[in-house]
């Protein structure tokens, strides 16, 4: 190979791409099979609903995904001259306008790459706003205890001092404590970050009063928009009284995010914050007045914005409103059906939840020795990915069905949960041993179920086919129960062992 001129001529000494995975699959068919084999290990939306609360795992429609692959969107350099991306420009402008309308805000930045980065950008806007008014000493950020961890982290990133606000018994922000904090920190208050509906899955009735009280004390309201799936078309952060809000386009607006990204977290701001949005990384920044960029490209992971554009374009205003209503209806249907088996931890004053609900499993520890993790793992035997576990409350499951799931699928999930409740009852009543039962041993791999010896106090059928409909579409987990805590504390290397690829049977 010809040497590239200008580069120092150095010989590579280390091996590279030496892992067999880079040298094993040489034909399209082989690679396809390898990828399918990886896919088969995963319990995904292609199997069943993934009711991860707060994450909003909704349909990523094929029609929304296709434009990502169009070369006009996927092959453009982020810093190509503007005249070369007029179509993109139009799409970005339209999406920005739609998001401004949906959030009730004056301006939107499409730059942040995640909700957390949106929080960071939004807090920078608030910070610059205070500084521009000679109030740079305002550095205290109130955050309710129930907030997502990223809220606290973002506040620390902009060098704010975090003051946690308590929640009351019903899971709402404790307004009494909030008002106390506002009095104590009045002089130095910069912002209050609040999630609506709250991470407890309830529409807090005091949200407008909260915004007013924060404003009255000279602070700005940052709304965490991760739960926008319960707001779109019905209300908006702007209408409620917030000053800035991020949108997780990979939650509410259909960008797929199983496996960790990439996401997009644009922010919307009220008019007084519009000049403090992130700048183009190549622009000259006036540090006194501007926040600079928050990401290395002007529109973040720009090409995936086509997914959200397509979603909004195809749904239209009425469609979006209906989706929100269905998401709320589905969550309430599920909460209502399961309430007799698993208490719903938080409900609003009318006895309803928002777009998700928290099922309280803590009581089963005393009666049956069953913990939330046992139920999460047992759901895998039924073919379901577990809902969000132990967040925002330890020992609970947070379920968010979204509008994408049909009643039939909701009923199947409800059925699985009721069957599991019956299994817990058997353990509690001593029919099954507290240590040897399908919950404690879940999930059951095929290897384990078909092994020569089976000494469990329940049948193989009870282990692997606990409900009739499981037979139609059985998902086999590739591994059994792992010790989460041990795994978190001990680093494992998945490097190639010397025997890899050799048929040593080791
Ligand atoms: C997901 C989530 C975030 C963070 O968003 P990312 O896009 O994952 O960075 C913040 N707050 C809440 C309530 C969330 O659910």
Image: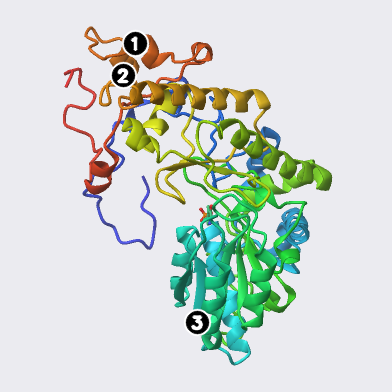
Badge 2 crowding class, 10 Å Cα cut-off, few under 14, some 14 to 19, many 20 or more, is some
Name the residue beneath numbered marker 1.
460
Residue 85, position as x, y percentages in the image: 71, 57
Question: Farthest residue toward the top?
Answer: 452
- Confirm whether residue 247 shows in the render: yes
Q: Is residue 475 left or right of residue 110?
A: left
Among numbered discs 3 and 1, the one appearing first in the sequence: 3
Q: Of discs 2 and 1, which sits in the foreground?
A: 2
User: Vertically, is 487 above or below 11?
Assistant: above
Is the N terminus in the top left, top right, bottom left or bottom right quadrant?
top left
Question: Nearest the camera: 344 or 326?
Answer: 344
Question: Farthest residue toward the bottom?
Answer: 134
Residue 13, position as x, y percentages in the image: 21, 49
Name the residue beneath numbered marker 2.
432
Residue 449 placement: quadrant: top left
Name the residue beneath numbered marker 3.
139
Residue 441, position as x, y percentages in the image: 30, 24
- The residue under the point 61% across, 83% down is 217
Q: Helix, strand or loop at disc 3?
A: loop
Among numbered discs 2 and 1, the one appearing first in the sequence: 2
Question: Nearest the camera: 89 or 203?
Answer: 203
């Amino acid at each position: 190979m010809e040497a590239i001129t200008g580069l120092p001529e150095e010989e590579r000494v280390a091996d590279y791409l030496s892992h067999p995975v880079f040298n094993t699959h040489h034909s399209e068919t082989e690679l396809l099979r390898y990828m399918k084999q990886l896919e088969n290990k995963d319990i995904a939306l292609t199997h069943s609903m993934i009711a991860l609360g707060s994450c909003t795992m909704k349909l990523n429609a094929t029609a929304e995904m296709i434009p990502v692959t169009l070369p006009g969107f996927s092959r453009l350099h982020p810093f190509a001259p503007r005249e070369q991306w007029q179509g993109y420009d139009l799409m970005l402008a339209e999406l920005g306008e739609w998001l401004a309308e949906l959030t009730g805000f004056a301006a939107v930045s499409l730059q942040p790459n995640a909700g957390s980065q949106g929080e960071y950008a939004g807090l920078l806007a608030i910070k610059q706003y205070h500084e521009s008014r000679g109030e740079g000493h305002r550095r205290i950020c109130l955050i309710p205890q129930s907030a997502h961890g990223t809220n606290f982290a973002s506040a620390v990133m902009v060098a704010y001092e975090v003051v946690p606000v308590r929640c009351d018994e019903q899971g709402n922000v404790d307004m009494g404590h909030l008002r106390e904090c506002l009095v104590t920190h009045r002089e130095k208050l910069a912002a209050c970050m609040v999630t609506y509906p709250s991470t407890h899955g309830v529409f807090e009735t005091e949200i407008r009063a909260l915004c007013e009280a924060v404003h009255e004390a000279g602070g700005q309201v940052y709304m965490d928009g991760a739960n926008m799936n319960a707001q779109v078309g019905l209300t908006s952060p702007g209408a409620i009284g917030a000053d800035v809000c991020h949108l997780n386009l990979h939650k509410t607006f259909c960008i797929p995010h199983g496996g960790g990204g990439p996401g997009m977290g644009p922010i919307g701001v009220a008019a007084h914050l519009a000049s403090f949005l992130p700048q183009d990384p190549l622009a000259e920044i006036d540090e006194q007045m501007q926040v600079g960029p928050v990401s290395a490209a002007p529109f973040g992971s720009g090409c995936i914005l086509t997914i959200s554009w397509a979603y909004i374009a195809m749904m239209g205003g009425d469609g979006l409103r209906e989706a929100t209503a269905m998401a709320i209806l589905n969550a309430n249907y599920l909460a209502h059906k399961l309430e007799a088996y698993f208490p719903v931890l938080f409900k609003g004053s009318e006895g309803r939840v928002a777009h998700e609900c928290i099922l309280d499993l803590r009581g089963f520890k005393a009666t049956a020795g069953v913990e939330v993790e046992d139920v999460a793992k047992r759901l895998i035997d039924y073919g379901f990915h577990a809902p969000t576990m132990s967040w925002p409350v330890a020992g609970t499951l947070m379920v968010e069905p979204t509008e994408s799931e049909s009643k039939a699928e909701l009923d199947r999930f409800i059925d699985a949960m009721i069957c599991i409740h019956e299994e817990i009852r058997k353990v509690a009543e001593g029919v099954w041993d507290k240590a040897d039962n399908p919950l404690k041993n879940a999930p059951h791999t095929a290897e384990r179920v078909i092994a020569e010896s089976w000494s469990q106090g329940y049948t193989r059928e009870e282990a692997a086919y606990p409900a009739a409909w499981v037979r139609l579409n059985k998902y086999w987990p590739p591994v059994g129960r792992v010790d989460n805590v041990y795994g978190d504390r001990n680093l494992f290397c998945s490097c190639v062992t010397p025997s890899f690829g050799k048929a040593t049977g080791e």
